[in-house]
Amino acid sequence: MVSSFEANIIATDTKNDLAILKSNVRPKRFYKISQDDPKLLDNVIIAGYPLGKRVSSAIKTSKGSVTSLAGYGDNYSNFQTDAALNQGNSGGPIYDRRGNIVGVAVKRLNVSQSDNFNFAIKGTTVKQFLDANSVITSLANRTSQMSSTDIYKIASKQTVMVVCHR
């Protein structure tokens, strides 16, 4: 069952393509944002709704690794990953193996020779934006790694499809 909620824009960061939205959704679990930047070759999992309902309304995930610590044009608030990122993944969480958010999917560079030019906003950049707007965040999990199944369970309860109607 798909539910719809209206949301108001509370704050935006146009440089990093971030926004804080407020709605009547009352989640039972909250994202835990890593306080550390991802490291080169760290394993990551992307969750989201690529291509929206054109494919299905089910959440989709992909695995990969951190392939560069800078984004397009040497943007150090981003990192690069080889995990599959498609239209509709933007704004979706990127998890580390502990179930913490290490990034937010932001864009895929259209290069005909390779599909591995995918970028994310670093979780530390997201945390700074949230802190600057007085949004309280949960403490990151610094202990044991989780199974892919456990991360999927977290992602499926925390990740929502956002559609803008303007």
Image: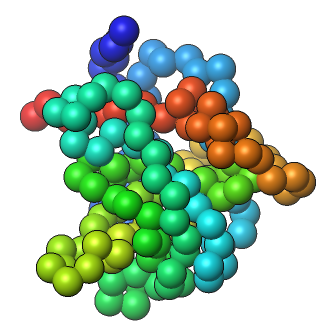
Closer to us: 68 or 149: 149
Which colour scheme appears in the figure?
rainbow
Q: Position of residue 47 (x, y in %)?
A: 47, 45
Taking the image as shown, residue 96 lies to the left or right of residue 23, namely right
Q: Position of residue 52 (x, y in %)?
A: 24, 36
Q: Position of residue 23 (x, y in %)?
A: 42, 22
Taking the image as shown, residue 73 lies to the left or right of residue 122, namely left
Dividing the picture into quarters, in which one does residue 59 lie? Answer: top left
Does 104 sit above or below residue 31? Answer: below
Does 160 sit above or below residue 121? Answer: above
Task: State which quarter of the image contains the C terminus.
Answer: top left
- Residue 9 visible to the viewer: no
Closer to us: 50 or 69: 50
Dividing the picture into quarters, in which one does residue 95 lie? Answer: bottom right
Does 34 sit above or below residue 58? Answer: below
Residue drawn at the location 26% of the way across and 79% of the way down: 114
Residue drawn at the location 62% of the way across and 66% of the way down: 43
Task: State which quarter of the image contains the N terminus.
Answer: top left
Dividing the picture into quarters, in which one does residue 138 lie? Answer: top right
Q: Position of residue 164 (x, y in %)?
A: 20, 35
Taking the image as shown, residue 103 lies to the left or right of residue 16, namely right
Residue drawn at the location 62% of the way across and 79% of the way down: 41
The single residue placed furthest to the left in the displayed view is 166
Residue drawn at the location 58% of the way across and 21% of the way down: 27
